[in-house]
Amino acid sequence: MNLPNKITLTRIFMIPVFVVVFFLTAIPYNYFIAGIIFVVAACTDFIDGHIARKYNLVTNLGKFLDPIADKVLVSTALICMLVKPELLQVMWQGEWVMTVCSICTAVILARELIVSGFRMVAASSGLVLAADKVGKVKTTFQDISIAMLLIGADFFGLLGVSKVLNVIGLICLAAAAVLTIWSGAGYIIKNRQVLRVPAEEKDEENKGEKNSEDS
């Protein structure tokens, strides 16, 4: 196993550590510490990819683990924060804050599921689809949002700083949701040929399968 894959595995192993620290309120400033853990884990995404490309260490294992690690890390953090209203209601209070954050989270998770399924269909046809630039910007906004919301909820009693960080986090979360829709729709439209399988090819495939069964 090469270095980039080891770094990716480290990011995966950091996810349960993040969850434990997040919910372990007996630890002083647990949200702040969880935020730091998240930031470190998110940074490993850029590090392993850079090393793999620079030194030509890209492997199928890395292609499999890297996107899974990213999606599980972000999804876990977003879901955990939804069960802690105090994280999201530092600046603004009310059910509308939780409603907006829940919708943004649902949009982000739905996009990841749809795009992952789309890539599976492409892979079954022998196509490899590269990530687009908008998707990378979306990921950056997601990471900033989660980090700001976590750190801002527990910023050593400095309420003014906590409110500023909370506002930045909520704005970035809303921006991430918009970019999520934009990147997801654009990704599928740009690669829509994946869904265009001619009827003739389907008939030939079915005939081939039937002949193989008969033989």
Image (spheres, rainbow, N blue to C red):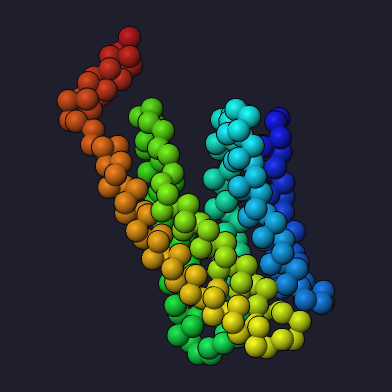
- Which of the 4 quarters of the picture holds residue 152? bottom right
Up/down of 183 relative to 116, above or below: below
Picture layout, residue 13 above or below residue 181: above
Q: Can you say whether 57 is above or below 9 in the image?
A: above
Indicate the position of residue 156 as horizontal and vertical percent values: 76, 82
Provide residue 203's location: percent of width, then percent of height. Answer: 20, 25
User: Residue at point 23% right, 33% down?
Assistant: 197
The answer to whether one can see residue 46 in this image is yes
Q: What quarter of the picture does the C terminus occupy?
A: top left
- Residue farthest to the front? 54
Residue at 19% across, 30% down = 198
Q: Is residue 95 found left or right of 197 in the rendered image?
A: right
| Residue 61 location (% of width, % of height) | 60, 33
- Closer-to-camera residue (206/213): 206
Quadrant placement of the N terminus: top right
The image quadrant that residue 6 belongs to is top right
Is residue 85 in view from this perspective? no
Taking the spot 65% from the left edge, 45% from the top edge, the residue there is: 47
